[in-house]
Amino acid sequence: MTTLEAAVAILGALGVGAAAFPVRARVVVAALFTILASLCALVVGIYELRTGHVVTVVSHSVIPVTGIDLRLDAMGAVFVSLTAVVAIAASVFTIGYAQHHSMSRSAAGAFPLFVVAMLLVPAAWSVMTFMALWEVMALASLVLVLSDYRRSESVRSAGLWYAVLTHVGAAAIALGLLLLAGHAGGQGFDAIISHSATMSSGLRGLVFVLLFAGFASKAGAVPLHVWLPRAHAEAPSAVSALMSAAMVNLGIYGVLRAGDTLLGGGPAWWWIMVIVTGAVSAIYGSIHAATSTDLKRLLAYSTTDNIGLVFIAIGTAGLLSASGSRTFAALALFAGLFHLVNHSIFKGTLFLSAGSIQYTTGTRNLDSLGGLLSRMPVASTIFAVGSVAISALPPLGGFVSEWILLQSLLHGLSNSTTVTIILMPLSVAALALTGGLTAAAFVKAFGVGFLGIPRSEAAERVVEPPRLMNFGAGTLGLLCVVLGLAPMVVIKGLSGAVRSAQPGSGSAVDARGVAIALRGAHGVFEPTLIALALGVAILLVGGLRWLLSRRLAVRRAPAWGCGRELQTARMTYTATSFAEPLQRIFDDIVQPSRDLDVSHREESRYFVESVRFGTRDADAFERTLYRPTFAAVRAIAHKARLLQNGSIHRYLGYGLAVLVIILVVAR
Amino acid sequence: MTTGQLTPWVIGADLGQVVLFLIGAPLLVGLMRSIRCRMEGRIGPPVTQPWKDLRKLVAKQRTQPVQSTIFFASAPVVLVASTIVAVWLTPLLSTQVSLVGGSDLFAVVFLLLLGSVSMSLAALDTATAFGGMGSSRLMTIVALAEPALLVAILALAAPLHSSSLSSIVVASLHHPVWLATPQRLLSFGAFVIVILAESGRLPVDNPATHLELTMIHEALILEYSGPDLALVNLGENLRLTFMLALLSNLFFPWGIATGTGGWSLPIALVSLIGKVAVLGALVSVGEVGVAKLRLFRVPELMAGAFMLSILAVLSALVIA
């Protein structure tokens, strides 16, 4: 196992060599190395989850001074396995994608590097190893986001936003980890774990806030989410899938690792902060998803929303654990991890199939799609499966994870402190509103984009994407179904991870046959049997309809539409019109930028010549929080120029002044 | 507590309630219509009229818009099937259910959501402006009703630490005084508002008109005809009846069979029919004096229901 874990890193390093190959071979080489590395990592991850043996790789010769220190425990193994599964699907998809689109040298080299960094981050067991891998992951993904930088200005701007936010986050994480290492007197995680309990509570709080802010920016939680809708929308779809289904998970991983392992749990206020951030992210993300018309932007906002739900669950776990109810804390943590697994699978499916749509139609704008289901049935069916799963509808994975999330919040109430009595109902409300809005968002995405009639020529002439693209997306789609019908397959592994994060809590959820049973609480759930019942009922009702109406064949006729003749695509509801009621209701939060341009005829103002109406999704945080911050930074930088006027005398004077200050302070 | 043993008696009772609902749902709607007619000084059609309409529709040919897909064709089936499963899972006649791991209030909510979503997709599949309008409005209302509904459920489930339907029903049965507690009354209020919204009754949607522009449900199903329309109507009737029955059993479970005794099932049957008929009659009496709300006033109503349900949870935990 140790060899395999080392093989992941070596394969990644070799994969970078893909950049050297000619344009056709480049993609295949990069994808094959990625797949091989992911397979090795998947084997290690599953081995760890099944046996519970910690896999360790320590070498002091690879990198001088700090060495490399990898140790994969059950919690890390969940993230590694999940990343590996998504990466395999995304690599297969990329091979199909590149049959007609070339891939630049830098992108081909960065792709394996990005995946391997993500596969190793959850195993990093020292501050230097962690930060080094974290930076490789950030930079490689930045290169990938910028793959199409020649295409448009928005790609470059997305890259800039991502670069700034990810590095501000990395700086916060580095500061937090260095404070921990400084106190422990060593940079290994073991040293930190054994010393962190002796830190003053103020310093512990500061460290947690820094780490939480840094990891939340990677996870895309509000208000640090602004890079997400830009970068996910502009990156190539396989990269969006990897970022949304694997990289943001590592933000969650970081919070769990920092809060549970490194700091060994903390006071209630830490976790209240996590829950509130989660609830705000969930609601904000789902409102934006429900009103977006850009398919990939919609998916990106829905990532913010799902990450918010996971934060609610792990915050609840921390809160309950701080107040001593360990069994229900374990349940909440399990719920968070289970939702994370589901989110990765369905979001991977959706991003990859959105990639197929963009590939074949050349647009991500839902308003100019339509009627895709009859023109590309396979790709559309995959998107439909992902949509059903994300909307938490029976019988797919989202339904099961929504139920477990609700149960964890319900049992969170059994410990009735004032804080839980206020927070749990509001969390349930956030979960419910999010669920409803997500259903609306995906009825819009699928109904407007794939059903009905095409709204543009590109959508009219569309055909199935290359087989490998469908195969990559379809594999994840199949896993959505597996998670819905047989969620037991992941329960044991996740329970192990929960035990490793909260020692002594026991397993929170048991799989008994087809039933999911909550430990220490009255709650049994049999999603497999509900799905079976639903299937039988559909067959019976459908069969009855067939029996009753088989005498006459189904007649195909133009839609009636209240007797309106000549229905064209322009008369159908678009994504913008579908979302209009929700947009009006949540106007204060969405704040779209609209411009209305009416021009009149010269003869009289009573005759309108033309009306132009445009509306664009805007992010309120960008305008109210980020723009003023940028302006302030720029103003300060402007003032700072006074220090530097070109006079050598003055610079020598600065040197002297600093020397004096150092002498005074240091003595 | 329920044991969940699969005896023929339990399976029989569960299947019996499905058959009862399939037969009774159109009759309840007929009853509600004739009560409303009488209140407005008209005679109105007989109570069995919805059944006669269904029989007439079934005999016709199925028609489907030209470009529509399997989503249009299968939505009525999914609507009826998901509601049937919800009826089957819920303890309506007997507190013993055949599928313990599915008899859960949250699960039932998501099953009903499946019906709404499939109808919304079918409406978009017709590619008409009316379909899109109905679909958009339905999903807006569903999204806004969800928080009130789930928090109201939480108010019922929190004191028991379980969202299992049979536990809630049994608990209501064993503590009759419990019905008059503030949290029960508050969550009852929230439930009633949400049920009226979800089943398309006044003041959210008017089931008695056919003016598609002002409506949600009629715009949604405009393209359905023949046997498909029959299924849609049956499904909508089933949903309304099921929600009223759920309401009556969550808050007034009197008469429900707890054992397997000889007379318990007939008593449960009569009392369920009685309770649902009374609730249906109350809804139609209430509808006589109410006008439909503007669509953009509906969020206020839902926010009100949400406040009621939050208060219900708070009082459930603070008082208890």
Image (cartoon, coloured by chain):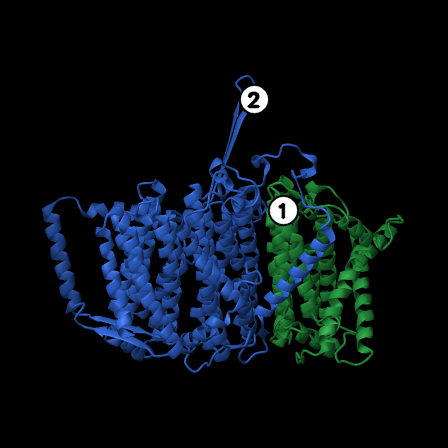
Chain colours: A blue, B green
Residue A189, horizontal then vertical, whole percent = 29, 74
Q: Nearer the viewer, residue B52 or A179?
A: B52
Residue drawn 53% across and 79% down?
A519
Q: Quadrant of residue B65?
A: top right
Relative to A116, A417 lies left or right: right
Specify the label residue B315 is tagged with: none
Q: Amino acid at mark 1?
A: Ala
Would you name the residue on which mark 2 appears? A605
Quarter of the rendering occupied by the N terminus of chain A: bottom left
- The kind of secondary structure element at disc 2 is loop
Quarter of the rendering occupied by the C terminus of chain A: bottom left
Q: Nearer the viewer, residue A298 or A199?
A: A298
- The kind of secondary structure element at disc 1 is helix
| Residue A403 visible to an observer of this rendering | yes
Is residue B36 depicted above or below A335 in this figure? above
Question: Do marks 2 and 1 both belong to one polypeptide chain?
Answer: no
Residue A625, horizontal then vertical, whole percent = 40, 51
